Amino acid sequence: MDDDMRRRRIKVRAWRRGLREMDILMGRFVDARVEALPAEALDELETLLDLPDDAVYRWLSGTEAPPAEHDTPLLRQIIAFHRHDGPIH
């Protein structure tokens, strides 16, 4: 499967998580950043999309630290994308 097709598939999966909060968290990040992600990051993103919503939601909301195998630069990018430490413009 080529990267463009993967990106389209990821967009659909990100907005159809099952848990509305996860739709918003993953969907908004994917809409904003998926086109710029390299193939390795797409692999990591697909792995995150395969994990249970409740676990990933706890990591993204900061209520639980992710296990080492999922504490990746991409996960940290998603967390930073939703953290509003400064002005939003």
Image: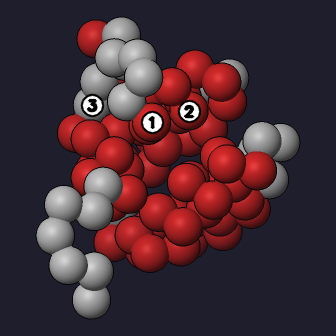
- For residue 72, which numbered disc appears in the image? 3
The residue under the point 62% across, 38% down is: 49
- Label 2 residue SS: helix
Query: Does residue 78 lie above or below 9 as drawn?
Result: above
Q: Residue 57 carries which label?
A: 2
Q: Which of 6 and 84 is in front in this view?
A: 84
x, y percentage for residue 13?
Answer: 73, 52
Residue 83, position in %: x, y? 30, 55
Res 13 seen here:
no
Amino acid, disc 2: Tyr
2 or 3: tag closer to the N-terminus:
2
At which x and y percent is residue 41? Answer: 35, 47
Between circles 2 and 3, the one closer to the viewer is 2
Q: At x 36% / y 10%, what residue is drawn?
A: 67
Q: Is residue 9 left or right of residue 30?
A: right
Q: In the picture provided, is 52 more to the left or to the right than 7? A: right
> Mark 2 to mark 3: distance in Å?
15 Å
